[in-house]
Amino acid sequence: MYETTLSSKGQLVLPAKARAERKQRPGTKFKVFPTPFGYELIEIPKNPLKALSGLASHLDISSADIKKMRREDDKRREKLFGI
């Protein structure tokens, strides 16, 4: 965990070690979410699809399984909404 201080201009500086760990460069964008205990910063990826790549790699699901689930979902959606 890292610590930083809010400036008189309302700016926060991410510590150099924290930026280096995530390979964040100037211009990196974040979303700020208020929480009951303060704020949470979430980095906005430059390429959201690339950021999702490998997210479910720990799951033992083949592309055939995914296609089957999508077909089943399409059928349910068609039955429910006539789409």
Image: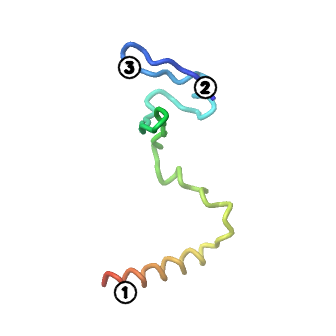
Dot 2 lies on which element?
loop
Residue ID for mark 2:
2
Dot 3 lies on which element?
loop
The vertical placement of 38 against 5, above or below, is below
**Badge 3: residue crowd in 10 Å (few <14, some 14–19, many ≥20):** few
- Cα distance between the residues tagged 1 and 3: 52 Å
Is the residue under label 1 in contact with that under label 2 (CB below 8 Å)? no
Q: Position of residue 44 (x, y in %)?
A: 45, 41
**In the current view of this chain or complex, which residue is farthest to the top?**
8
- Lower position in the chain sequence, tag 2 or tag 1: 2
Amino acid type at mark 1: Lys
Q: Position of residue 46 (x, y in %)?
A: 45, 43
Amino acid type at mark 3: Gly
- Lower position in the chain sequence, tag 1 or tag 3: 3
Residue ID for mark 1:
79
Residue ID for mark 3:
10
Relative to the observer, which residue lies in front, 52 or 82?
Answer: 82
